[in-house]
Amino acid sequence: MRGRPLCVIGMAFFFSFFFLLTEWPLPVYNDSTFDGQTITVIGEVSRKECKNGKYQIYLKNASRSDRINSNEQNRTGKSGVLLYLSDQYDMPEKLPRLGSNIRVKGKKRLFDQASNPGQFDTARYYQCRGMDYCLQNTVILSESQSCNYYAECMYRVRQYLTEVFMAVCEKQDAEILSAVMLGEKNLPEPEMKDMYQRSGAGHLLVVSGLHISLVGYALFRGLKMAGLMQTAAALIASFFVYSYALLAGMGTSAQRALIMFLTALFGECIGRAYDLLTSLALASLVLLFQNPLLALDSGFLLSFGSIMGIGVLLPTFDRLIPAKGKLISSLKASLSVSVFTFPITLYFFYQYPLYSIFFNLVFVPLMSVLFLTGFLTLFLGIISVKAGMTAAVLPHLILWVYEKGNCLYAELPFGNLILGRPEKGRILLYYVLIASAVGLSGYLTGETTGKERCIRAAVLCLAAGAAALMLFPRQPEFEAVVLDVGQGDCNYIRFQDFHCLIDGGSTSVKEPGKYRMEPFLKAKGVQKLDLVFLSHMDADHVNGIYELMELASEGGVQIGCILIPPSEESDEPYQRLREASTQAGIPLKFMKKGDCVSHGRLKIFCLYPEKKVLVSDDKNENSMVLKVENENFRGLFTGDLEGRGEEELLASLREEQYILLKAGHHGSKGASSDSLLRKIRPRMVTVSCGEGNSYGHPHQEFLNRVQEVTEGVYITKDCGAISIMGKNHKELQIKCYKEER
């Protein structure tokens, strides 16, 4: 990096911002004043989007504006507000103009914060985009006459061009082309996005900064060849690239490409050589000073990391692998990007598409062809719909290749390696080892001497050590986690390489399996659940498991076996579960009192019920009760047990102290009786229930009983996920996710 001071400074800021903000994250906006109430807000329109057929508006410099009288308004501090518009705003023409000041009315809602490891943090996501809260079912009351006319013009051009694509292409093709070339956020469909992301080709569905730059350079060179002065050509090309970036939504990748393009043109105009890394560093400094929270954004990190991988690692691979050729060069470039972004991908997505390096050898070059044929289709479609439809055959063939390639990827074994989220210290050490390997490779001369071979061996050892850090993370020997799934139950047990769930469902959270359980498991590096225990068949204990079974067929977490309490063959929930498990190829077995599952020093005993001895028609009272223990942990998981069922359990329960009691029936009035508490003397009691649930869980009488006999009561709606972990027979540690995050 000698002679590149700006590059060094930029890289230092790049990493420093990330590690500082992840280690000491800024507080998320949590002013719950008027939360759930209708308020009036004024602010400036900064962005308009359409997602899932619904229009939404980003407001900046927003403030609450509640009318006190006809001549006075009360205004509070400035904020960013996301507006979810009411159904009456169903067309772009009904939306306010970009840059205009509007007055709106809607129901205030805070963004959801993550309450489990691995869960997507909506509040943090929108905080990185300057949004503090949202208004639902928003109505626009008034709009100023002034606006940003040029930005509004570019927005309307994008809408028009999207309509052209829709007119001349098949629906799916139009959706992808609109996303790739115009930055449309409403497209494509979620299923299509998932398919591309599983193959590591998700980056192809957003506007590429590379293509923005290539279009700009092509225009610049063309204007110079046409005889235009260099300065004039540079100004025209710069204006075009800026306009295109604005049309495409001015996302992070587009902003990065714009800054780097302007830097390159300025350097050429003053007769200075262009340096990729220095230009990248300048772009990172500009964007991070503008918004430091971009360092927490996956799009920003992957965009900059990809270019940095090309600039830093590609020369190293050229020295290590002197072989030439287009295929070899493409492979080295793909490998450079993959190696540099490997920890970033794992940190945000917890898994890595194993074959993406090779698939991108085909996908990435074809993207340039798709870009050009898309422009041709768009140009001809503006002139004539028939001509556009004829030209649309070319991008259709490329997208067909993409689709078939993604389908093929889904059939390959080990397509996605679930490795979990690496710790920040491990990421730092990874890049230290990679930097050491890059520095050492600078001494390679291409000769076949002993010194040369030693240097190559050292470089490979450093690279292998870096890979091992990500592939083989350290994990606690034992861990028990009570997940926050709202009004429901989900408990995770890990011992060495054994993983299991006890229940998994919710009645208050949308798709708990997809959005809470699976992300948690992937963040923990769980590729397969050895066992899933279901205490009973109520939806708040089982509906997330159905989702996991469906996701398993799409490369998600696999399930080895499902264990349930004795059930009647005629029982409808049992029949449904049996059909779903059979279709997924997952064995379904009964577990009764006296049965035991063991893995090394970990033992899981079923204490209740006995086979075909059901004390009540109430499923809660027939819940399967599990005792989980090893040498330094003993936990009792009671499902929704209460009443007569609990009385039956007490008759056969030994008197011994437990570390953990998972309270029965979400802490209801009749759960976890005084007799049970006195008999097991739990050190801690966990209650799984949702915020503001209609049942009043946990009940005050329950809390009064528990607090008399235990050291602490932990409630998921207050604490988030509650984990108990230990390593090498050491003292167990208790952590609450909402306190740790």
Image (spheres, rainbow, N blue to C red):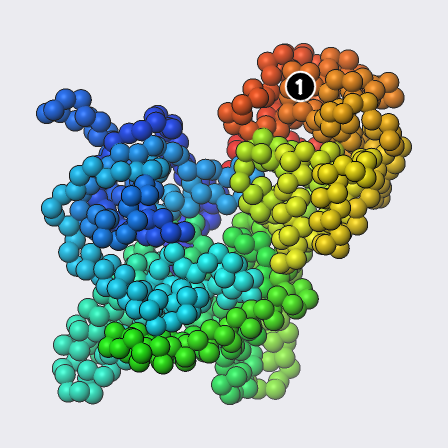
Determine whether 370 is above or below 430 in the image.
Answer: below
Secondary structure under tag 1 reads: loop
The image quadrant of residue 76 is: top left
Give coordinates of residue 282: x percent, y percent: 31, 62
Using residue 684 as the reference point, say whether residue 53 is left or right of it: left
For the question of whether residue 134 can be seen, the reply is: yes
Using residue 473 as the reference point, say whether residue 217 is left or right of it: left
How dense is the environment of label 1, judged by Cα within 10 Å: few (below 14), some, or many (20 and up)? few
Outermost residue on the front side: it is 570
Q: Amino acid at mark 1?
A: Glu
For the question of whether residue 726 can be seen, the reply is: no
> Residue 329 versus residue 412: which sits nearer the camera?
412
- Residue drawn at point x = 52 percent, y = 70 percent: 403
Which image quarter is the N terminus in? bottom left
- Residue drawn at point x = 33 percent, y = 58 percent: 251
Using residue 57 as the reference point, say whether residue 627 is left or right of it: right
- Which residue bears the numbered disc 1? 711
> Residue 446 versus residue 351: which sits nearer the camera?
351
- Residue drawn at point x = 79 percent, y = 41 percent: 563
Give coordinates of residue 302: x percent, y percent: 45, 60
> Residue 69 versus residue 482: which sits nearer the camera?
69
Determine whether 509 is above or below 696 in the image.
Answer: below
Give coordinates of residue 255: x percent, y percent: 31, 61
Tell me how many marks there are: 1
Give coordinates of residue 498: x percent, y percent: 76, 47
